[in-house]
Amino acid sequence: MTTLTVSGRVAQVLSSYLSDVFGVMGNGNVYFLDAAEKLGLRFSPVRHEGAAIAAADAYYRTSGRLAAGTTTYGPGYTNALTALAEAVQAQIPVVLVTGDAPSSGARPQDVDQAAIAAGLGAATFTVTRDAAGTITQQAVEYALTKRTAVVIAIPYDLASLEAADEELPELPAPKVTDDVDGGLGQVARLLAGAKRPLILAGRGAHLAGAGPELRKLADRLGALTAGTALALNLLNGEGYLGVAGGFGTDTATGLMGEADVVLVAGASLSPFTMRFGHLLGPDSTVIQIDTALQPTNERVDLFVSADAKSAAGRLLQLLDVEATAEGWRAEARKRLAEGPAHSPGSDVTEDGRLDPRSLAIALNAVLPERRTVVQDGGHFIGWAPMYWNIPRPQDLVMVGTAFQSIGLGLASAVGAARALEDGRTLVLASGDGGFLMGLPDLESLIGTASSAIVVIYNDAAYGAEIHQYGSQGLTEKPMLIPEVDFSGIARALGAESAIVRSLADLSALTEWIDAGTQGTFVADCRITSSVRAPWLTEWMNAKQAAKAAVAG
């Protein structure tokens, strides 16, 4: 093998798995970045170390391809921890290449980075001169196999030293099995006898590529279909009810509650998806197919541990019958047409600012149809999946939800924008609080994206806290944010922008889109904090009910 430094060997092995690296250069990773450039890896600089992992995470969520983030040791590493925790919690394969304390022993300024990573649930692979390539390969394979974030640590005193020659071990071929749990026979019998079947798909079904099989199965049964927010439109077609959970309409939720047999494929059935126990009727039979080893919700009556795609294919073989529940779809069509959809919002609000619901509807009509949406965490989180057309599951990148954080949106937009290769426009939805947290990487997005639109739901507050705690009489002073002119900041950094105080002000965005959607446009939308999202009300009510139950 060619003579390489330890850092070079790490970069060489990584280059066989990935093409993109995001990060901030420092003492601990400067040799790695030098080697990565020489090997042809594409480096996208970000301005805060937290953005390194967040961008690599979103790159994977958007494209399905692995990427790496990189930081220096110490403060560079600790700056990346929130994004690292989010990737672990969300089960996203991602690699953090970082400097570390010298192999000879920690210096006064060093911290125990491996212990910190372990506390977040991330494994650390520390390379040596003798096995830098092998250890790097082990780390990447671990990330891909376990669907998690890993840390590749390069001790500072080894980074520029010559690495030993080594032959990388041959990787075993992926196991391909056609057999799935024998419980599918019982699943088939239950589905065949259903009068009101429902198929609910989650992110696991999307990642397994099970959409076509599940859609065909639904058509064969005459079943209604739905998806979690992370499987949005995976099963779109006849009988599709939209999102299951707090982002769904009351009409669709009512229909789901009447299903007699529910097949759940690749969804964990989180409290939010289950509407805190109110999504499905008490008499419905719930079947879960998942790669997990056991049910993930107590409502599950029959569990099959299997890949969603292979299981759906086997069920199609077992259910070679005509649709048995076509009347169920006809009833659903009628009720969906007659029943209330999401609230259209209002033209008038208490404080004269925009209603976020009417704004979301207007934006949906304006935004390019070929769109990939990145969404930060915050009170506004439901407006995009509720009101915007988002074509495919991979076109909705919801960050921060796994770790319950805000502030990762801008950094994630950088990674998603870099991953887009088919002319789609990147749309970032963010609150003003989260946007301010990630503000340095607005410059990164402007420098990276060929076509990006940033929508800031600017209510001059931490909106979720206003509704949860301000409504209880707690002081709102810490929850308020001074009115920030994000439009002015964006122009200073080279983006087009506009302050949107009325729906008519969206004309500036429309003109930019009509001119070709080149570059980045920031829409600073001044919204009211007087409108509480229905999903938040539902969550608050569930919390209150749980407290009352404990007190009682």
Image (cartoon, grey):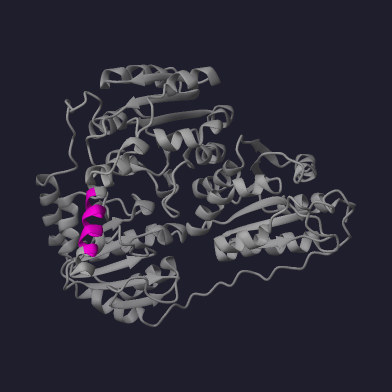
Q: What secondary structure is the magenta-colored segment mainly?
A: helix
Where is residue 102 drawn, in percent x and y?
81, 55
**Could you tell me which quadrant the N terminus lies in?**
bottom right
Say left or right for 295 vs 84.
left
Q: Is residue 491 above or below residue 141?
A: above
The residue positioned 53% from the left and 30% from the top of the image is 442
**Could you tell me which quadrant the C terminus lies in?**
bottom left
The residue positioned 14% from the left and 51% from the top of the image is 333
Residues 1 and 35: in front is 35
Where is residue 212 drawn, in percent x and y?
38, 58
Q: Is residue 365 above or below residue 214?
A: above
Magenta region includes residue 71? no
Residues 393 and 522: in front is 522
Residues 92 and 64: in front is 92
Q: How many marks?
A: 0
Q: Is residue 367 above or below residue 291?
A: above
Say left or right for 521 vs 340.
right
Say left or right for 38 vs 342.
right
Q: Quadrant of residue 170?
A: bottom right
Say left or right for 445 vs 21.
left
Residue 426 seen: no
Where is residue 15 drawn, in percent x and y?
72, 50
- The boundaries of the magenta stretch are 537-547
Residue 111 seen: yes
